[in-house]
Amino acid sequence: MKHNISEINIEEFQMDLENRIRNLLWTISGDYSQEMKPDVSLFLRSKAIALYDGIKQGALAKFYDKDFLVLYLVKKVFLGADEGSLMTIAQLCIEEAIGEKICAQRPGIRSMQREAFEDILEQEYERMPALGDTLGRLRVTILRERIDKCLGKKPYESSEKTGKKTGLAKYRDMVALAGETEDTMELVRVIDQLYNAIVEPGFEREKGTLEQVLAVTMEDLTEYDWRDFLTEEMYEDALESYVEQLAGNMAAMENTAVTQEMEEKREIRRKVTVLPPEALEKSYTYVELNFGKTYLSEAEEKRMNYLMCRDIHSDCSLYFTEGILKNPVKRNYQYEYAKRLKNKNVWLYHDKHRIVKRNIAVLTEMLKKSLVLRSETQEVLSDRGIIVPSRVWRIGRSRESAIFRRELKGDASDFVVDVLIDASGSQMSRQGEVALQAYIISEALSNAEIPHRVMSYCTFWDYTILHRFREYDDPRSANEDIFNYVTSSNNRDGLAVRAAGYGLLMREEEKKILIILSDGRPYDVIVNRPNARNPAPYHGSYAVSDTATQIRNLRNQGVSVLGVFAGEEKDLDTEKKIFGKDFAYIRTINNFSKIVGRYLMKQLELDS
């Protein structure tokens, strides 16, 4: 989630935020008499959502009769419509009606629009809603279409053109009609028809037609008790309060319940006194809370720390986990944060699934081809085997006196691969892309039936955390856990490489390969870590030299190491120092499989 304002000092900025959102409303609408009550908690949830809501409020007032529209909604609810479903449908139709209009007039809004919709998807949906949740699936479909539109991709086409005759496509066509409306009555008619079609097909028969809805009088509405519909205790003029409440929400696309829940959690966090690290009985407990329980026994953990944490890493510790989402101590704020980041990774995969699947297919084909070549049987001349009659004459007459033929059977099953991912905070902007890279490699290796392990690493306080997503012989389904990849804190690359290499060297396979996805910036400077046991800052040439040394040690023991670089171009020289000639510079994911595939093929075909 994007927070541009300190939560601690939010009260100081509240008036400024409200004025900023109101100014957007007035600028877009051109009507300085328009009123709205900006929701600052929404701004804390997402700057883009809050600002885009202000823009839409202004656009709605500019292009349509906002008062007429909100009164229709109130009257529909009065006659028994489900408020939540009606509001969702109204929001979808309003976005369809004004989203493109405001972007056409002010192109700069499009990037804010895209960011707002991305934040909604990330915060509200872990996966596509179930088949029975028609409104939820329709909402996600439209949000993703709007994002695609902002990115310049193919606009929505009706089911008549695409040939898709699903129920969802039919409802999407109905929403699309809102984009063609020229006046408020047309827009109301689209909203009403869509509600009756999806939510209550019997509404007209049992509760009233659109004409009967609009015929409800102000006297009827005033006499009705609206208190159960209000989110705050504003009972003196319940109808006016309810109208104001609906007016504030109907142009939005976000789920206000999610905003409210996030605000409540923020308030709780503000009231809790956070103890400084030195006040904690054990920093280990804090690591466990933030990264999940370890999968090692106490004895195994002590053994690994004794073996690995030596030399310049002697005062460090290793922590092995399958992550907070798999093995949480409790569902705390860090758990919810990790869950949102996982959702973001998954949505990026859905966004780029065609590219990802193509990369997986290409890399799989390259691996299988190399394995087939390696497994072919070769015939060689030897000093033993089956006699070759045509060569018998060479005995005593030629130096090439081998007269036997022997078959050498290739072995395609003597390979093992480790994938190690840098999960430090510097990878945050590339988090989804890095997760996709690891997923592509893992899926292709699974398809080629090559055992492999995938782990990420970061350093928190004195602990280098190794997050295991899949073990060498896990089933293919374990690859999905790679989307649990979360970035945070620092990175002590040398120690992580040493620990990963140790597990790889313990394998029986003859050919061992380590692939490291990193940005070429080992960095573990002790900041805000009182009483840290290891005071030496790990960065610059000191850290680069250590990481390069660990990689050389592994290569000397027969491990092939490839660095996959996805960082900034200015860090390329550092990557070369660490990995030498065996590193791949990935500019886009499109050709990822070919670049990585060429290296893997070279290793698979070596000595074949």
Image (cartoon, rainbow, N blue to C red):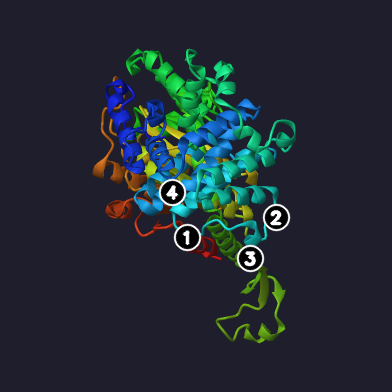
Where 606 falls versus 47 (above or below)?
Answer: below
Left or right, residue 283 beside residue 381: left
Q: Residues within 10 Å of mark 3 (few under 14, many from 20)?
A: few
Q: Amino acid at mark 4?
A: Ile
- Kindly indicate whether the residue at mark 3 contacts the one at mark 4 (C-beta within 8 angstroms): no
| Lower position in the chain sequence, tag 3 or tag 2 | 2
Q: Please indicate, yes or no, whether residue 179 appears anywhere in the rendered image.
A: yes
Q: CA distance from mark 3 to mark 2?
A: 44 Å
Q: Nearer the viewer, mark 2 or mark 1?
A: 2
Q: CA distance from mark 2 to mark 4?
A: 46 Å
Q: Nearer the viewer, mark 1 or mark 3?
A: 1
Q: Amino acid at mark 2?
A: Lys
Q: Quadrant of residue 398?
A: bottom right
Quadrant of the snapshot with the N terminus: top left
Q: Name the residue that disc number 4 marks.
A: 516
Q: Position of residue 161 (x, y in %)?
A: 63, 62
Q: Name the residue that disc number 2 marks.
A: 165
Q: CA distance from mark 2 to mark 1?
A: 32 Å
Q: Amino acid at mark 3?
A: Val
Q: Nearer the viewer, mark 4 or mark 3?
A: 4
Residue in the image at 40% along x and 40% along y: 52
Q: Amino acid at mark 1?
A: Asn
Q: Name the residue that disc number 3 marks.
A: 372
Where 172 falls versus 200 (above or below)?
Answer: below
Q: Position of residue 590 (x, y in %)?
A: 47, 60
Residue in the image at 67% along x and 39% along y: 196
Q: Please indicate, yes or no, whether residue 492 appears anywhere in the rendered image.
A: no
Count of picture labels: 4
Q: Position of residue 372 (x, y in %)?
A: 63, 65
Q: Name the residue that disc number 1 marks.
A: 590
